[in-house]
Image: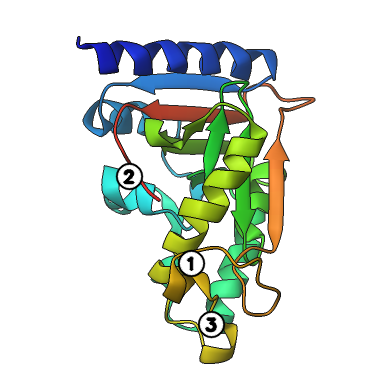
Amino acid sequence: MNEREWLQEKRAERIIRNLSKNCMNGHYFASARDAVPEILRHIPGGSVVGLGDSLTLQQTGIIAALEKGDYHLLNPWAEQDGERKVEMQRRIFTADVFVAGTNAITLEGELINMDGRGNRVAAMIFGPKKVLVVAGTNKIVPDREEGFRRIREIAGPANAQRHRWFPKDMQPPCATTGFCSDCKPPATICCALTVIRGQRVDKDRIHVFLIAEELGL
């Protein structure tokens, strides 16, 4: 183990301790290859599984594994029809398991996220019986303010560029400039900012899987 790997592991250990204090669960893996089988073990066969829009889930191979498994998969991002996509997003609120990424996670074990429609953060907060959050260690930030900064400077512009199929009147400026200009609706993907500090009940609901790789945006 080199110095960088040691540091990542120590940061992950602190986050996992704090997730536990916040009535959530943390897991740490050296690679996506190690993490994916463990993530799948948290999803019983036959489950209805909803997906949040996440580049991390694509990069790790989780989506491909779910497509091959014994699950009823709700993947709105594979749906071309707009109305059917929104209907599937609503159906996810009653799913057995919701799998998503996160924009940032603090050393205090808090999940920081910004959404355009809000379906992802809403499902993380309430609805699905279990929530599995997958994140590379590049998403780790010291505190909330750094999490907000990461969204403004990295995740927001990068995701706007990734979704550049938006109609022209709804295209966020950062998709072109690469910099946040505090744009307003409807030309923004930054509508719902959430901080999940923890769970009051059902301590087994949220599981965070930290992977020692640079994943997502």
- Where does the image place residue 171, in percent across and percent down from the top left? 53, 81
Query: Nearest the camera: 10 or 77?
Result: 10
Question: Quick check: 181 left or right of 157?
Answer: right
Please report the residue visible at 27 percent of the width from the left and 33 percent of the height from the top: 32
Q: What element does badge 3 sit on?
A: helix
Which amino acid lies under the numbered mark 3 shown in the image of this protein? Gly
State the CA–CA distance, disc 3 to disc 1.
9 Å
- Where does the image place residue 123, in percent across and percent down from the top left? 65, 50
Q: If the image is split into quadrants, where does the N terminus sit?
A: top left
Q: Residues within 10 Å of mark 2 (few under 14, many from 20)?
A: many
Please report the residue visible at 62 percent of the width from the left and 65 percent of the height from the top: 116
Q: What element does badge 2 sit on?
A: helix
State the CA–CA distance, disc 1 to disc 2.
15 Å
Which amino acid lies under the numbered mark 2 shown in the image of this protein? Ile
Residue 206 position by quadrant: top right
Using the rendered image of the protein, determine whether residue 130 is visible from the camera's viewpoint.
Answer: no
Please report the residue visible at 63 percent of the width from the left and 63 percent of the height from the top: 190
Query: Nearest the camera: 194 or 6?
Result: 6
- Residue position marked by numbered label 2 in the rendering: 62
Which amino acid lies under the numbered mark 1 shown in the image of this protein? Pro
Q: Residues within 10 Å of mark 1 (few under 14, many from 20)?
A: many
Q: What element does badge 1 sit on?
A: helix
Task: State whether residue 125 is above or below residue 3.
Answer: below
Q: Which mark is residue 23?
A: none
- Residue position marked by numbered label 3 in the rendering: 82
- Where does the image place residue 96, in percent across and percent down from the top left? 57, 43
Q: Earlier in the sequence, mark 2 or mark 3?
A: 2
Q: Are marks 2 and 3 in contact (CB under 8 Å)?
A: no
Q: Which mark is residue 76?
A: 1
Residue 131 position by quadrant: top right
